[in-house]
Each structure stands twice: as structure tokens, then as C-alpha cells.
Image (cartoon, helix red, strand yellow):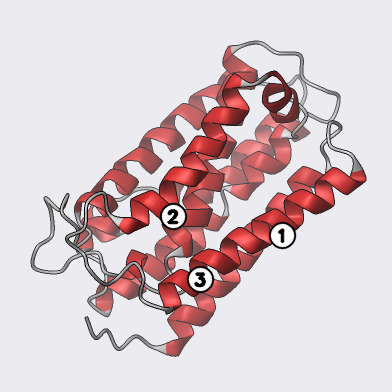
């Protein structure tokens, strides 16, 4: 693989990843469950995870030996994040942590999806991802990012609180996320590839775009999990939501 991508794409996606990290720091800062020391430990753990994934991709760990099964990207980059979400959902302390996070800031987090989709479109032009991963190819995930501030305003700035609107929006956005993620994985040049053989999804295997499946997508998914648990389960919402 010898992709010659413009440096501005790497910079743009690096900034998008940084924005996602900083927004999650704000979300965690608002938690009433974690102690100040606990919050700092999570900040550091997140940074270390991002750094590890960046180093692995920069050293071509994910982009070599592509026929290995399970794919290294799944085994090292994606599954640990998914397992962490599951652990938080099934443990008492994890659920208490989830219920302490503010839904307003979690909703605003989805604005990063605007910049992700713009980068994906530029990557498509540079033949690093297939068209099906862009808004031109039927990926409507950019609507999640564009609608996030509108929904946050309608739900949290207007009274009374509108849980049904927020619930419906989260379900729709989760379905849009599942749609593009499934297409992205099936278009990657791995043993599971079923789509886009003429222009595979190379980008998610290389630095810095590996942060999309290993960091940004898991955090966005986690945000939807948090919101749906709180809204469907009718768990008491704190004054700050």
C-alpha cells in the first residue's frame, strides 16, 4: 500500500480527534461520580490509548499481513473499546458512572461527525476510502452532526425537558452510525471484505485515520449507549441532565 495523501488531511483529522478528546474531557469533568483524581486517571488513560493506536498505525501494524484472522485492527484496536463499554454497562460501578454523565454535552459531542464526514469525502477524492462511506454515496451520518446542536438547543434550552425527542434522535443517529461503520468495515481490505473492491477503505488502517474506528467511533457509540440507557430506562436525570 502506497497512499500519497495530502498533509492537510492528516492535520484536519488530527484536530478532529483532539476536539473529540477535549469534548470528552468536558463530559467527564461534569461527572458527579468520579473523584478529581479519578477523572485525571481517565484523561491519562484516554491519551495513552490514543497514543498507542497512533504508534501501532504509524508502524504499519494494522496495514501489513492483512489476511490474518481475526484482523489485528479488530483484535487490538476495536474490541478492547467495545469490551470496555460492555463492562461499564453490566457492572454496578459502571452504570453509576454512566448515569453521572451529562446528556447535554454528550449530545453536542456528535458535532464532530460533521468534520469526520468532510475528511472522509476528501479521503474518497484521494482514493483512500470508497464512495459508499461519503454523503455522496448514501452515508447520511453528517446529518447527525448537523442536527446535534439543534437538538441540544430544543431539548435542553427549552422547557419542559423533551426526552422523547432526544430518544428518537439518538435512535436515528445510532442507526446512521451502524450503517456507515458496517459499510466501512466490510469495505476494508481485510478477510471480511465484501464491498468496494475497486477502491477499498485503506484509511482506517493508517495513521492518523486509525483513530476513527479505535477512538472517535467508540466514544460516539458510547454516547448513544449512555443516552439510550438513561432515556429508555427512565433513570432519574440530574438537574444539569
Q: Is residue 189 left or right of residue 228?
A: left
Q: Is residue 157 left or right of residue 53?
A: right
Is any atom of residue 113 visible in this view?
no
Asked if 188 appears above or below 226 in the picture, the reply is below
Tell which circle, 2 or 3, labels the residue nearer the N-terminal end. 3
Q: CA distance from mark 2 to mark 1?
A: 21 Å
Query: In which quarter of the view is residue 88 placed?
Result: top right
The residue located at (67%, 62%) in the rendering is 47
The residue located at (74%, 49%) in the rendering is 42
Say which residue label 1 marks.
22
The residue located at (59%, 72%) in the rendering is 15
Q: Is residue 180 left or right of residue 109?
A: left
Asked if 205 appears above or below 100 in the picture, the reply is below
Sort mark 3 into few (<14), some (14-19) or many (20+) by Cα contacts within 10 Å.
Answer: some
Is any atom of residue 136 visible in this view?
yes
Asked if 108 appears above or below 159 in the picture, the reply is below
Residue 80: x percent and y percent?
49, 45
Query: In which quarter of the view is residue 206 placed?
Result: bottom left
Q: Nearer the viewer, residue 180 or 147?
A: 180
Q: Which mark is residue 54?
A: 3
Look at the numbered disc 1 and give the secondary structure of its residue: helix
Residue 8: x percent and y percent?
47, 85
Q: Nearer the viewer, residue 119 or 5?
A: 5
Say which residue label 2 marks.
77
Sort mark 2 into few (<14), some (14-19) or many (20+) by Cα contacts within 10 Å.
Answer: many
Asked if 35 appears above or below 75 in the picture, the reply is above
Amino acid at each position: 500500500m502506497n497512499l500519497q495523501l495530502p498533509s492537510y488531511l492528516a492535520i484536519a483529522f488530527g484536530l478532529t480527534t483532539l476536539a473529540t478528546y477535549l469534548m470528552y474531557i468536558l463530559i467527564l469533568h461534569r461527572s458527579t461520580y468520579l473523584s478529581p483524581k479519578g477523572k485525571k486517571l481517565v484523561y491519562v488513560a484516554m491519551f495513552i490509548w490514543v497514543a498507542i493506536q497512533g504508534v501501532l498505525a504509524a508502524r504499519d501494524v494494522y496495514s501489513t499481513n492483512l489476511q490474518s484472522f481475526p484482523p489485528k485492527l479488530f483484535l487490538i484496536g476495536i474490541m478492547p473499546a467495545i469490551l470496555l463499554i460492555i463492562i461499564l454497562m453490566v457492572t454496578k460501578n459502571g452504570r453509576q458512572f454512566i448515569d453521572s454523565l451529562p446528556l447535554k454535552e454528550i449530545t453536542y459531542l456528535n458535532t464532530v461527525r460533521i468534520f469526520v464526514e468532510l475528511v472522509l469525502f476528501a479521503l474518497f477524492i484521494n482514493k483512500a476510502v470508497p464512495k459508499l462511506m461519503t454523503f455522496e454515496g448514501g452515508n447520511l451520518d453528517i446529518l447527525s452532526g448537523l442536527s446535534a446542536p439543534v437538538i441540544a438547543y430544543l431539548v435542553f434550552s427549552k422547557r419542559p425537558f423533551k426526552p422523547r425527542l432526544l430518544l428518537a434522535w439518538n435512535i436515528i443517529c445510532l442507526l446512521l452510525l451502524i450503517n456507515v461503520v458496517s459499510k466501512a468495515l466490510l469495505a476494508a481490505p481485510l478477510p471480511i471484505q465484501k464491498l468496494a473492491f475497486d477502491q477499498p477503505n485503506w484509511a482506517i488502517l493508517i495513521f492518523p485515520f486509525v483513530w476513527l474506528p479505535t477512538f472517535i467511533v467508540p466514544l460516539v457509540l458510547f454516547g448513544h449507549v449512555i443516552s439510550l440507557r438513561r432515556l429508555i430506562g427512565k433513570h432519574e436525570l440530574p438537574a444539569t441532565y
